[in-house]
Image: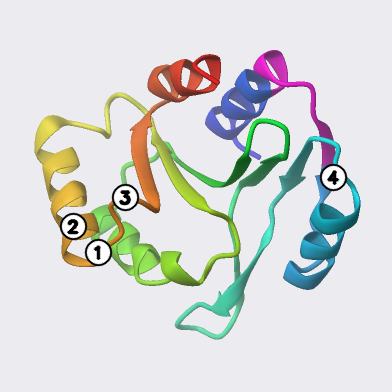
Amino acid sequence: MNNFEKQIFDIIKKQISVTPRKSISVIADKIIKKYDNKNKLFIQPCSPYLTPIGNQKRSDLSLYCPVLNIDWRIECKSRQTIGLLGEIKSELDYVANIPEQLYCLVMTDNLLTPHFLNELNQNVIEKGLEHKVWIGTAKQFKKKLKQL
């Protein structure tokens, strides 16, 4: 877990009482959610799809809070890399297949420029994922949690 991911982890823990768990598999996580109504924060949850190189993608966090009706996959992006936009667009191809209700893409302020956000939003619209994807900064994510 890098510093930005830890920051998001800490924001969640300050806003909501959760039990952190290491994710085992998509099936195990579903069973835990079904039979345990306590708030959970799954660390590196498994995805139900393979990456282009054949490995199962492991996202950063999965937040499950049944009382607040939260079942979110949280992907954190903090590093500028060549092809970051293409990488995110590729990940969005699989959002419809994730078991969580909402995909939260949390990015650092320096990455989430107006131009970059417009490109991402356009891609979300093209893929018909407007109701399945939320994009914002750590500050906006904290505000989203406080509104619950």
| Residue 24 vertical placement versus 138 (above, below) | below
Q: Nearer the viewer, mark 4 or mark 1?
A: 1
- Number of residues whose C-alpha sits closer than 10 Å to that of mark 4, classed few (under 14), some (14–19) or many (20 or more): some
Q: Give the spatial CA distance, label 2 vs label 1.
A: 5 Å
- Image quadrant containing the C terminus: top right
* Mark 1 vs 3: CB contact within 8 A: no
Point out residue 137 in the picture as x, y percentages from the top left corner: 37, 26
Identify the mark at residue 21; answer none if there is no mark: 4
**Residues rendered magenta in the picture:** 13-20
Answer few, some or many: residues within 10 Å of disc 1's Cα (few below 14, many 20 plus, some between 14 and 19): few
Viewer-proximal residue among 43 and 31:
31
Which numbered marker is on residue 81? 3
Up-down relation of residue 90 to residue 137 (above or below): below
> To which residue does mark 1 refer?
128
Q: Nearer the viewer, residue 141 or 116?
A: 141
x 31%, y 59%: residue: 129
